[in-house]
Image (cartoon, rainbow, N blue to C red):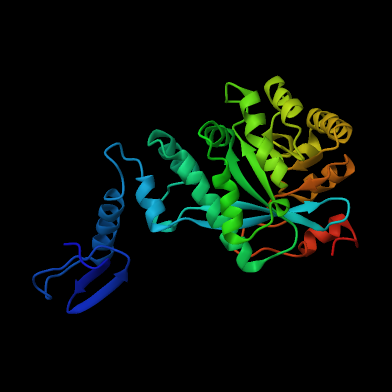
Amino acid sequence: MFTGGRLDLHTGGRVLVMQGMPTLIHSSPTTKVNPVRVWTQNLQHWWRARQDSSGQPQVGKILEKKSLSSVFQPMVELGSGAVFGHEALVRVPRSMGELSFDNLLGAAETQRCQKQLELACVDYAIERWMQERPKGQLYVNISAKTLVQLHESGTTDSLLQLLRKHKLQPKNMGLDIAGYTRIGNVDALVAALVPLRAAGMSMALDDFKASDSSMLVWKKVLPSIVKMAPRWTQGIDGNMESCSVVSSMVRMTKKHDCLLLAKSVESEAELRVMRQLGVDLAQGYFLGSPAADTITTVNLRARAVLGAEAH
């Protein structure tokens, strides 16, 4: 039976207790039990209790428990090697098994609480960021859909309230906007960003694909940063077509007074090519993995590529 949020396993007179799990009580302490099998069964039972009838996680309950956490991945200036800022990423606890944040986001959309989930993630990110008070910019992920919903419901200020709650200046935070090509009305997104820009926040377009729809959003939103989709980074050292596309984006960003960021930089060769092509910023495992703590300097391997100025 479930009691007190613990899992008690009776194994030959011993009791194994695991906090945060349901309790299984056997009538006889001498009963032979396979503790691994019982623990697995109870873990599955505990997780199923937190899913709805469709097998999806119950997002509302997860938010109530504040189970999610934030980690930070550095965004590095390729010209100087300095840490420009960090992107906040959401992590789902291991107790939820193989559930990814994308799966959780899909469940939130189905359960019509995507806006609540995204705002909660922004809240967690700012709270964790302010505990360290690092230098540079904090970029948080938010969908174009949620931004438009906030605008249309007249609740855009709820986003600014999170900054006031944690005493973070809007000029120190940027929005990493996703899903901007999937909304029907780009003008609605532009309107949603007006009060946020007026407060001092900067904007980034995530996973930019150099398509006609992406270019339309770029021209209307006029972001501070364009973050290239990972496909343009991966294996670029051996792909002339990707080099040509990135070179074109470098020229366009300079023309529009915008910074270009390469995502998913995972090798020395990729970093070298991005720097040679004139890309402004980069992030990826080669430069720094997502972690609970922020960094002030890049690692030694990245420093070797970026030169003595990377300090």
Q: Residue at x 70, y 64 (%)?
A: 134
Q: Residue at x 56, y 32 (%)?
A: 148
Q: Position of residue 166 (x, y in %)?
A: 59, 60
Residue in the foreground of this view, choosing between 59 and 306 = 59
Residue in the foreground of this view, choosing between 194 and 4 = 194
User: In the figure, is residue 65 to the left or right of 182?
Assistant: left
Please indicate, yes or no, whether residue 206 appears anywhere in the rendered image. no
Please indicate, yes or no, whether residue 246 appears anywhere in the rendered image. yes
Quadrant containing the C terminus is bottom right
User: In the figure, is residue 86 to the left or right of 111?
Assistant: right
Q: Position of residue 142 (x, y in %)?
A: 58, 41
User: In the picture, residue 146 is in which quadrant?
Assistant: top right
User: In the figure, is residue 245 to the left or right of 37?
Assistant: right
User: In the picture, residue 40 is in which quadrant?
Assistant: bottom left
Q: Position of residue 114 (x, y in %)?
A: 46, 39
Q: Residue at x 86, y 37 (%)?
A: 257
Q: Residue at x 44, y 35 (%)?
A: 109
Residue farthest left in this picture:
27
Residue in the foreground of this view, choosing between 21 and 152 = 152
Q: Position of residue 113 (x, y in %)?
A: 42, 40
User: Is residue 131 depicted above or below 98 in this figure?
Assistant: below
Quadrant containing the N terminus is bottom left
User: In the picture, residue 39 is in which quadrant?
Assistant: bottom left
Residue farthest bottom in this picture:
13
How many marks overall?
0
